[in-house]
Amino acid sequence: MTIRYDGTNYHGWQVQKNALAVQPVVQDSLCKILKYRPDVTGCSRTDSGVHAQGYCFHFDYTGRMDAQSLVKAMNTVLPDDIAAIDCRQVPDDFHARYAVKSKVYRYRFYNGKTRDPFYRQYAQFIPYRLDEQRMQQAAQAFVGTYDFVGFCASGSAVEDTVRTVMAADVWRQGEIVTFQVEADGFLYNMVRIMAGTLLYVSQGKIDPADMKSILLSKDRKKAGPTAPACGLCLYKVNY
Amino acid sequence: MTIRYDGTNYHGWQVQKNALAVQPVVQDSLCKILKYRPDVTGCSRTDSGVHAQGYCFHFDYTGRMDAQSLVKAMNTVLPDDIAAIDCRQVPDDFHARYAVKSKVYRYRFYNGKTRDPFYRQYAQFIPYRLDEQRMQQAAQAFVGTYDFVGFCASGSAVEDTVRTVMAADVWRQGEIVTFQVEADGFLYNMVRIMAGTLLYVSQGKIDPADMKSILLSKDRKKAGPTAPACGLCLYKVNY
């Protein structure tokens, strides 16, 4: 099942103690329809406050409702900041996390002169003019197979920090500057650190030509700051 | 001063008993900067839950801050769902309501297959395919000087119900269908009733060729329903 959610009021996907997460809300909603509470397995964790345009999870179902009826039924019980978008039957051995071929994230900057109330929860506000061409040039350094440990929040327990980035692009539409990155997997805070580093590039603190050596240095301190969660959206999961 | 606000949490512009409105919040914010609480006069009332892309108000100020510094200062004290966009000095006899030449409203429909959490507070969700060309055709009947009493909520105390609509257009951008209307003034719920009537047109309940006679009948019952507030936005005020 594919869902879309406004992550503003959630502490990410994963079940948390003493904090509202998307996963248990989805399980509770499925429970109302299926009359039992299924395990659901998501495609990835998402951070607190991060949004999803197309988040995927799987669950076992042996009942008779077809996939589109499940979508309709879910949309009557889910809260209004989460919506079911699509659903399809998959092979028994399908796994929403392990079967991922790539994930596409988008990080958005609102680049107007004054802050915009309509983007306050969906983009980072940057009041000075962003140089999206310079950012686009720098982002090309991310494309390829590298050890991205320098673009990973410290304290992460992941052992293998090598990932393959298929594409990275920055573009402007009016006052919105979007950074989109597709990879076979992402480390903890990886996109937000990339976004913060591209801000440094726009500010002239980092030269686009130096991005590759920053990446190869594997030194978190050479990259930029972690950009705020609200600008980040898990845009699409490819299987 | 021009402000932008997300009206979701406000009962419109006008001060209300026992309900949060935009006007007193603006006054409180000005008070923090000016050290006195000025009267502020808005360009119009807006309904509960209606948004503003560019709402204008005036107030008297004899201090030394320039207009752009007032904007900056306001944005540090206003809540994050209201932002100051612009400010300029006006002649002493300027009046934010009486000096209005025209106002532009936009009503938005989210016309996707499933509801979208990101538009839940900013558009009316319509799950069946809207016929924006048919709606555009029908909207042309609004253009001109007419008695719009049939497109006014009952119980309104306004005596003169003649208004001049300069332009009315409907267009689609992906899953968003926008109805934009510019007039020298609007009656209570006028845009929302127009939007609801255009929905009837799309559904085939009203023929575009009959719109003019519905308008001329001055009969509220012949027009469509009042569309929900969340889709409405005061887009621009022209002086």
Image: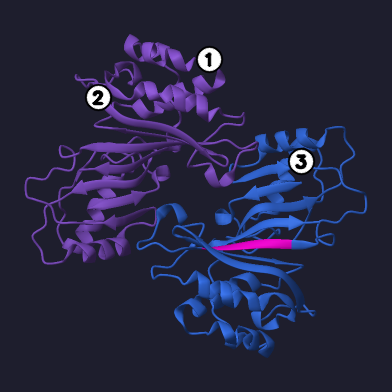
Chain colours: A blue, B purple
The chain under label 3 reads A
User: Could you tell which of marks 1 and 2 lies nearer the N-terminus?
Assistant: 2
Mark 2 crowd level (few <14, some 14–19, many ≥20, 10 Å Cα): some
Question: What range of the chain is rendered magenta?
Answer: A103-108
The chain under label 2 reads B
Distance CA(mark 3)–CA(mark 2)? 53 Å
The residue singled out by tag 1 in the image is B205
| Residue that appears at 24% across and 32% down | B184
The residue singled out by tag 2 in the image is B163
Q: Amino acid at mark 2?
A: Arg
The chain under label 1 reads B
The image shows residue A93 at horizontal and vertical percentages of 92, 54
Mark 3 crowd level (few <14, some 14–19, many ≥20, 10 Å Cα): some
The image shows residue B209 at horizontal and vertical percentages of 44, 14
Element under disc 3: helix
The residue singled out by tag 3 in the image is A31
Are dots 3 and 2 on a single chain? no
Q: Nearer the viewer, residue A93 or A31?
A: A93
Q: Nearer the viewer, residue B58 or B182?
A: B182
| Residue that appears at 75% across and 68% down | A185
Are dots 3 and 1 on a single chain? no
Q: Amino acid at mark 1?
A: Lys
The image shows residue A232 at horizontal and vertical percentages of 58, 62
Mark 1 crowd level (few <14, some 14–19, many ≥20, 10 Å Cα): few
